[in-house]
Image (spheres, rainbow, N blue to C red):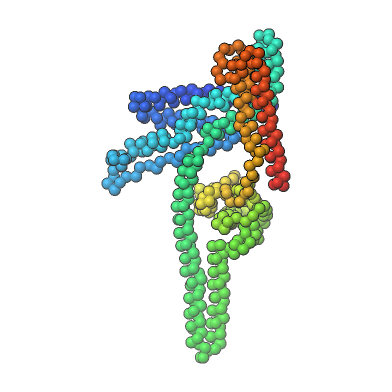
């Protein structure tokens, strides 16, 4: 069943690649018209068409090949801002409306983004690079069926060979198509940095606003709480001094009242300090701080922590207050009785999962608490994923990348050999092997760049078979070394 699914997927990917070739041809015509005839208004729709097609390829690579591909495009330009007199400036020109400046900005953004041209290149080359690779098993089987239908005994041997190799080749070809798509359509370092700068700029604004609000809250709590109580303590002590000689009993009562008020003010100051940065967090780390937090909550909280080391103080603080806010929401709004907190690591990534048995229905867009968590995490490139269907349960997952220090394994001959074999095994196996074999069987005279077809006739079949064996050996070596590497990682993690 897995082989049949891989064959169908590879055939579909080959069809998508053929359709992408058609889209690339249409886009080429549009770009030629825009540059030769000055039809510059054709550029945005042409680029949007190409990007829709490459987005489809990214989605199929994720769903069918199991390869995640991030979008590589630079952030969209901001809309034009009018000057003080209401006009819009674009270079040295002024415009009454923002239409032309906005169009020029968008056109510059589309044409200067290298991902735009890589999208064109992918659609033009996909049918030959990845599409033919993914569709090769089905094509080979069809060739074998045609040969058998023609009464060829060699065709029967060919069909059996194609069916036998499809069991391992078809799933590998589908996955390799996704890898090729990731290489050609993945995000570049420039695009990643541009998106990160844009995201950090927004996060910085949110953090500054959040810090200003936090300072105002602390000032308000000090003014209305501890400061007012300390002023009252001073006034009470002053009244007791005046009554010390005339009414010692009343002075003693006032001093007792002042002592109670000072104790209350001290307690409020401790709570305020705990709200800013809990001492247990600074002294004992995130694990013990969350356990202490779980003991203070009215819920029955179950805490599981698996961390190899402590985090940096800002990351610990952000994670702690995020967990605190999630537990507070569970107590106030969900009607939960139990909560489960799991803190673990995945490589250098910190992952925190908080689940409660409440009635669900939580939505980050309808409250300030969850939005505040997102703002706090955004400063560290962290994310909050929330799943809270009506009726419960509610599960919140927090991920903070690059939170833990992970030692990178040293580069060895095995890893180098594995990388070389995975990267180059398709070259002798597919174009120089199977494709050359097909051309030899059908009797085509086109030799192109196929090495075996340039050899003397007596050496062509040995060369083709040698190429297939070489590619198969490289693939087997890569698979064996990958399995050993994965097993070693599992033993190390255990």
Report x, y in % for residue 87. Answer: 28, 43
- Residue 46, compared with residue 88, is above or below; it is above
Q: In the rendered image, which quarter contains the N terminus?
A: top right
- The answer to whether residue 458 is left or right of residue 115 is right
**For this rendering, which residue is in front, 279 or 386?**
279
Q: Residue 163 falls in which quadrant of the image?
A: top right
Q: Residue furthest front?
A: 456
- Give the percent coordinates (x, y) of residue 327: 60, 55
Q: At 57% across and 64% down in the image, what residue appears?
A: 274
The answer to whether one can see residue 251 in this image is yes
The part of the image, by quadrant, that contains residue 174 is top right
Location of residue 396 with respect to 50 vertically, above or below: below
**Residue 307: image location, x then y, percent:** 65, 53
Residue 145 occupies quadrant: top right
Residue at the far top in the pictured view: 151
Q: Residue at x 63, y 42 (%)?
A: 411
Q: Is residue 340 visible?
A: no
Q: How many marks?
A: 0
> Residue 485, how many percent across, how many down?
68, 39
User: Which residue is at a point 55% across and 18% down the rendered structure image?
Assistant: 448
Q: Residue at point 55% right, 82% down?
A: 255
């Amino acid at each position: 069943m897995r082989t049949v699914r891989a064959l169908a997927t590879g055939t579909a990917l080959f069809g998508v690649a053929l359709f992408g070739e058609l889209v690339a041809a249409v886009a080429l015509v549009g770009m030629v018209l825009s540059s030769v005839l000055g039809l510059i208004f054709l550029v945005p729709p042409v680029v949007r068409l190409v990007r829709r097609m490459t987005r489809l390829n990214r989605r199929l690579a994720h769903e069918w090949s199991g390869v995640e591909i991030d979008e590589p495009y630079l952030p969209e330009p901001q809309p034009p801002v009018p000057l003080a007199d209401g006009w819009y400036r674009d270079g040295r020109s002024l415009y009454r409306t923002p239409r032309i400046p906005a169009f020029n900005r968008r056109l510059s953004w589309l044409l200067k983004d290298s991902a735009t041209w890589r999208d064109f290149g992918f659609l033009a080359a996909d049918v030959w690079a990845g599409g033919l690779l993914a569709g090769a098993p089905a094509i080979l089987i069809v060739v074998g069926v045609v040969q058998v239908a023609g009464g060829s005994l060699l065709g029967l041997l060919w069909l059996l060979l194609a069916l036998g190799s499809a069991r391992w080749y078809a799933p590998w070809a589908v996955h390799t198509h996704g890898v090729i798509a990731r290489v050609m359509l993945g995000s570049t370092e420039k695009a990643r940095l541009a998106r990160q700068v844009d995201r950090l700029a927004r996060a910085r604004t949110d953090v500054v606003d959040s810090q200003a609000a936090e300072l105002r809250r602390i000032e308000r709590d000090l003014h209305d709480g501890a400061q007012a109580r300390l002023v009252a303590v001073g006034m009470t002590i002053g009244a007791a001094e005046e009554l010390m000689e005339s009414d010692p009993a009343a002075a003693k009562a006032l001093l007792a009242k002042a002592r109670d008020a000072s104790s209350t003010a001290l307690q409020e100051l401790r709570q305020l300090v705990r709200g800013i940065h809990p001492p247990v967090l600074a002294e004992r780390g995130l694990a013990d701080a969350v356990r202490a937090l779980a003991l203070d909550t009215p819920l029955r909280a179950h805490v599981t922590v698996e961390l190899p080391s402590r985090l940096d103080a800002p990351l610990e603080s952000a994670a702690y207050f995020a967990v605190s806010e999630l537990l507070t929401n569970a107590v106030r709004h969900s009607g939960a009785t139990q909560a489960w907190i799991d803190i673990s690591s995945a490589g250098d990534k910190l992952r925190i999962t908080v689940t409660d048995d409440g009635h669900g229905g939580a939505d980050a867009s309808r409250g300030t608490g969850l939005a505040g968590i997102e703002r706090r995490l955004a400063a560290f490139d962290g994310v909050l994923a929330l799943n809270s269907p009506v009726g419960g349960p509610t599960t919140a997952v927090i991920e903070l990348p690059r939170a833990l220090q992970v030692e990178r394994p040293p580069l060895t001959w095995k890893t180098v050999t594995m990388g070389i074999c995975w990267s180059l095994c398709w070259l002798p196996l597919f174009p120089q092997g199977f494709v050359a074999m097909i051309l030899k069987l059908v009797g085509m005279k086109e030799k192109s760049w196929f090495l075996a077809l340039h050899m003397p006739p007596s050496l062509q079949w040995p060369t083709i078979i040698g190429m297939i064996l070489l590619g198969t050996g490289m693939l087997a070596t890569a698979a064996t070394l990958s399995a050993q590497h994965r097993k070693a990682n599992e033993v190390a993690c255990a």
